[in-house]
Image (tube, helix red, strand yellow):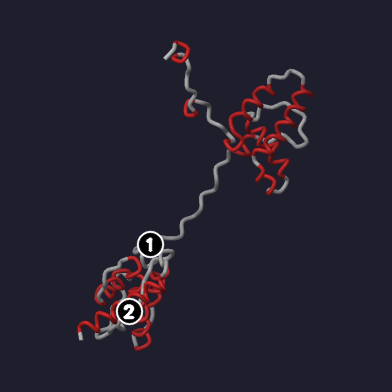
Amino acid sequence: MTESENNIGLDYNTERERLEMPEYGRNVLKMVEKMKEIPERDKRSEQARAIVKVMELLNPQVRQLDNYEHKLWDHLYMIAGFDLDVESPYPSPVAEEFNTRPVPLPMKGEKIKATHYGRNIEKIINLLCNEPDGELKTEMIRSLAIYMRQQYLIWNKDSVSDETIFKDIEKLSDHKLKIPEGIKLSQINIDANYSRPGLNINVGQGGKNRGNFRKGNKGKRK
């Protein structure tokens, strides 16, 4: 390796100044810095208009915005660090308007106790706690338990007993809701497929194949 090759330095982006508008690239930043060095204001303004045209070509999706030309001039001021004395068709933006922190969004109540059941299940359980005991309440608890079993099997592929679901209901209600004695859930359909949302690819085909597989096994057992 020659001495000239040894003297060649690599210019890494991590060692450069951070770009305020990275979508326009570092070359636009250099153009703006050169433009700011022009002593004549009219020539600076002419160069600023040319840079805005370049920015529009580099970031064509900005045209989808309302008043996109105004946005481009705001971006130019941001790239220049809001230190730019040119004749602009729009008022000069104020740095504080772009540096305000977003308003924090309020949290939706308390933390979910069991995420695989969801918040709505907790709300239903709280409503059931206030219902008077009777056949109607028992049927409502049974329907809720069946639905919770389905949700459980979506995220936990292992089988689940009725007692586990009943214990979850009592636990989520802070033991205010008691499961009536003798309540039983309906049997799970052998062909039921509880898949996670977005993961049920070829569900119909898979279910069909599984059904044929079971039939074949039954035939062999006979």
Is disc 2 in contact with disc 1, using a CB cutoff of under 8 Å? no
Q: Where is residue 141 in the image (x, y as percent from the top left)?
A: 35, 80
Q: Where is residue 111 in the image (x, y as percent from the top left)?
A: 38, 59
Which quadrant of the structure image shows residue 50? Answer: top right
Where does label 1 land, which residue? 112
Q: Is residue 1 left or right of residue 92?
A: left
Estimate how packed mark 2 is, as few (under 14), some (14 to 19) or many (20 or more) residues with alpha carbons within 10 Å. few
Decide which of 217, 55 is in the foreground and name it: 217
Q: Is residue 120 left or right of residue 221?
A: right
Which quadrant of the structure image shows residue 20? Answer: top right
Q: Which amino acid does label 2 sit on?
A: Asn
Residue furthest top in the image = 3
Q: Residue at x 65, y 46 (%)?
A: 61
Q: CA gap, disc 2 to disc 1?
A: 41 Å
In this rendering, is residue 24 above or below 111?
Answer: above
Q: Position of residue 97 (x, y in %)?
A: 63, 39
Q: Residue at x 44, y 60 (%)?
A: 109
Q: Position of residue 34 (x, y in %)?
A: 67, 22
- Element under disc 2: helix
Decide which of 72, 94 is in the foreground and name it: 72
Residue 52 is tagged as none
Where does label 2 land, which residue? 212
Q: Residue at x 68, y 49 (%)?
A: 64
Q: What residue type is labelled 1?
A: Ile
Q: Is residue 48 left or right of residue 136?
A: right
Q: Residue at x 34, y 87 (%)?
A: 134
Residue 97 in sight in this render: yes
